Image: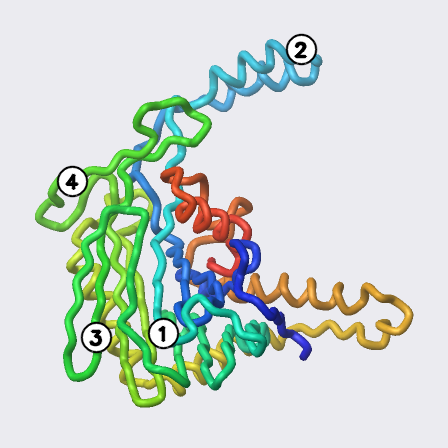
Amino acid sequence: MRHTLQNDAPADGFADCYLLGNGALGAAVHGRPGTERLDLNLDTLWSGGPAGPGVWCDPGDVAPLRAAVAAGDHRRADELARALQSDRWVQAFQPLGWIEWEHDRAQSGKNSAAYRRSLDMSAAVAVTDAGAGVRLETFVSAVDDVLVARADGAPTAAPLLCSPHPVRTTSSTQSGVTWVTMSGRAPANVLPHYVPDDTPVVYCDDAPDEDGLVDAGMGFALVVAWVPDERGGSLVAAAESGFRGWRARPSADVDALAQVARTRVEAALGLGVHELRARHVRAHRALWERCELDLSASAASNPHAEKAELYFDLGRYLLVAGSRRGTQPLTLQGMVPDPVTGSPEVRQIRLVGRICQAAFYR
């Protein structure tokens, strides 16, 4: 099927995950049978806080450096360049965490011969078909700013929310809907991995001021609603960070952030999964269908034509999923920089973000 990626096994690592995104919220879908894992990123979740103007560099100071470069005096050029460098480090993008959702206990950890997973790039929808009628469909809507997962064919369980950061998780059930909320704060300072230091990652527990603001270490919240039914169940999730602009002190009022995310989920639940999917696909295709590359006529004479078309489609899919007004700009490195810790889970989330930034974003 054109515009579709397909695999007959779950993701073996970060490079094999299917990527979904709406410009701000990104998800890497592993396609695990029975218990799905969704790695999550939020484009404004960074360590640190506004650092001020730093050391002023007069434009005239660059002239000697340029002259040294032009003269081929590399030693002198290096000395002058180092003298112009700031003594501070840029802060680091942070992973939000991940969701583990058991949508078929009988199939958890198994991989049947009938297993298939796919990513329809024309609709921005990922599907995991574990066989025996068990199916999981996932998308991230830009219209409603939520992640939606729908499981059919087996009973589902409440999701497990995890993060590499210190977090508080709460759960409650109201009118048949189970609400799970995870909130915490990003590090106040993160040093690059190549800088020797006994404390490369620093968290703060200072109380926010009366406006809920802090100097560094913004708050974040992830809110997930689980709605079980006789056919399976649905998840609807939203995330919010305390980012208020690059010059503004961030918010660490995690309760307020969680309420913002919950309000978004409540609005999405009012629409229902089918309407959410329809709205999402319409908005995605409004961008996707602006362009078309069809190399089918060249396939007979050029064995690489089909792959070239697929790579082209994947590239524009990532751009559509990652380029939305009002979100943070795409970057070369990706949404996720160097690891906060040495744990394999954190490394994986960051590597996913690096490679797939476009799907997450901006």
Q: Residues within 10 Å of mark 4 (few under 14, many from 20)?
A: few
Looking at the image, do the residues carrying marks 3 and 2 touch, with CB atoms under 8 Å apart?
Answer: no
Q: Residues within 10 Å of mark 1 (few under 14, many from 20)?
A: some
Q: Nearer the viewer's eye, disc 3 or disc 2?
A: 3
* Residue with the mark numbered 1: 105
Camera sees residue 153: yes
Tag 4, which secondary structure? loop
Q: Nearer the viewer's eye, disc 4 or disc 2?
A: 4
Image mark for residue 178: 3
Percent from the top left, x then y, of residue 72?
70, 13
The CA span between labels 3 and 2 is 67 Å
The CA span between labels 3 and 1 is 19 Å
The CA span between labels 2 and 1 is 67 Å
Percent from the top left, x then y, of residue 272?
33, 85
Looking at the image, do the residues carrying marks 3 and 4 touch, with CB atoms under 8 Å apart?
Answer: no
Tag 1, which secondary structure? helix
Q: Residues within 10 Å of mark 3 (few under 14, many from 20)?
A: some
* Residue with the mark numbered 2: 73
Percent from the top left, x then y, of residue 247?
31, 42
* Residue with the mark numbered 4: 205
Q: Report the residue at 45% width, 42% height from top.
A: 337
Amino acid beneath label 3? Thr
**Circle nearer the N terminus (3, 1):** 1
